Amino acid sequence: MGSPLNILIAASEIYPFAKTGGLADACGALAKALRNLGHNVRVVLPKYRCVRDSQYDLRKRPERISVPVGPHKVEGEIYEGELAPGVPACFIAQDAYFDRDHLYGPPAGAYYDNAERFIFFSRAVLELCRVTRFRPDIINCNDWQTGLIPVFLKTLFIYDAFFRKTRTVFSIHNLGYQGEFDRTNLTLAHLPFSLFNADGVEFHGDLNFLKSGLVYADLLSTVSETYAREILRPEYAFRLEGVLGKRAANLHGIANGIDYSEWNPTLDPWIIRQFSDDNPAGKKLCKSDLLQQFDLEQDLALPLMCMVTRLTSQKGVDLVMQVIQRNLLEKAQLIVVGVGDPGYEEFFKNRAGHRLGLFLGFDEPLAHRVLAGADFLLMPSVYEPCGLTQMQAMKYGTVPVVSAVGGLEDTVTPYSPETGEGLGFKFSPYGLEFFETALDRALTTYDDQAHWNRLVLNCLRANFSWDRSAREYERIYRIALSH
């Protein structure tokens, strides 16, 4: 389909090095899938405190980078490791910005200097390319933290011969997080104030990093076909429908996939018993182990539901709280794994113990054990650009109950008792009554052994690999290069 491309994936988090959500999983898996298609791929992210040299066998490169930030030159170092065989991972080290307890800020807020931190990172990505002599055909930027990279290329670097053929694709993982900062940060970025207008980087009086990427990137992508359509409408666009409408012809929806080398019950080292569609018996042992770990009733016949999520309003936590306050725990047990809004955390802490297991935090091995042992996954999201957890859950035979939005609409087909086809349960419009109806359908199916076994088998056999998605990215990269 053409010669191999030099592709740089720039992101603020990439699994396994740093992760707060699906952005990290998607970027890491896409890089590996593109490498499997024969492309020359590398990733770049900040060297946070959580990225330890010994854990990832990192080496410091001899080159250094120097980035103008306001009146100062800020020095940075480059470390290199490997995401996967043949996929280098580059890390930009600058301890004053990145040697901190959290990636973006403590749970209750954001770091005061996030604008400065990611101004530095975005410019440092380009400086890294120059000093390491890696000339990218495509820089795939991801979310607001990299939104200034396309701006720099179209302004400060526009006459730089090194980047003459470089094109950018800006991938939207969640439009709800935009990186809005005071306009004075333009001076820190050394960008001219002539860009600060409605057709440029200005948004309601602020410098908006995400909008900057939307305006200046050569092509745009987002993480599901339905979400690409939704964000053109005011109710999903977070006030950016006008900007996105102007670029609708350049906006491509490509559903994320799942990295089955990481999420696969036949290989998973973190679950008590591996299983598959041909030999699903191990799932019951995983359920028993999970119930024991959370000190819940050892009743394998009782449905076990789970949520593995950020505890935010976007994720539909309010609906789950309401069904708990009604009678959900009379019909099923529930395990919640996540961290987020203190009010939500307090609600679950006050109810933990009686048919409700709780872990406040994120633990990757635990997430695997929960999805392997649960019967149902609850994802009643208000909006969901793609969602990975529902696809991960299905690979483990855990049936999703979801709202019909974004990537949930694209990946979860409703189970039909008449045909025996489908992968889960959906509800629309958004609301408690419709969520409860979907839960009732799910529990009715659970009580019918023949239908339940068929549904679980459907989930175990569903295929959401990255291969198709990576080919779609390859296609739009070539479109960008033809511009």
Image: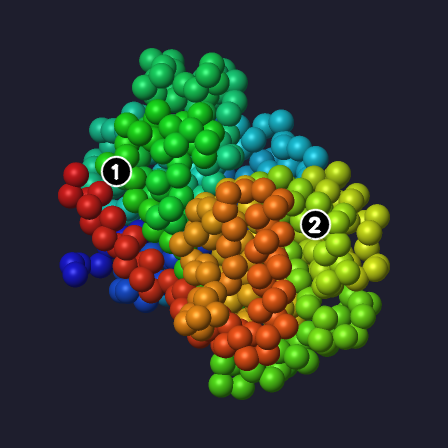
Q: Position of residue 185 (x, y in %)?
A: 49, 20
The residue tagged with tag 1: helix, strand or loop? helix
Q: In the image, residue 287 lies at what x, y percent?
A: 68, 74
Foreground: disc 2 or disc 1: 2
Residue 65 at x, y percent in the picture:
43, 38
Look at the numbered disc 2 and give the secondary structure of its residue: helix
- Which residue, given by chain and number where applicable, does mark 2 sit on? 323
Quadrant housing the N terminus: bottom left
Query: In this picture, is 170 found above or below 453?
Result: above
Which sits earlier in the primary sequence, circle 2 or circle 1? 1
Q: Does 64 sit left or right of 306 as displayed? A: left
Q: Position of residue 397 (x, y in %)?
A: 54, 72
Instruction: Give 307 or 456, whichever is nearer the viewer.
Output: 456
Asked which quadrant contains residue 127, the reply is top left
Q: Is residue 57 visible?
A: no
What residue is at 58 percent from the left and 42 percent from the top? 431
Q: Quadrant of the C terminus?
A: top left
Which kind of residue does numbered mark 1 sit on? Asn
Q: Nearer the viewer, residue 325 or 131?
A: 325
From the viewer's perspective, tell me whether residue 280 is left or right of residue 323.
Answer: left
Q: Which residue is mark 1?
A: 250
Neighbor class of circle 2 (other Cα within 10 Å; few <14, some 14-19, many 20+) is: some
Q: Residue at x 84, y 48 (%)?
A: 350
Q: Which class describes the residues within 10 Å of circle 1: few (<14), some (14-19), or many (20+)?
A: some
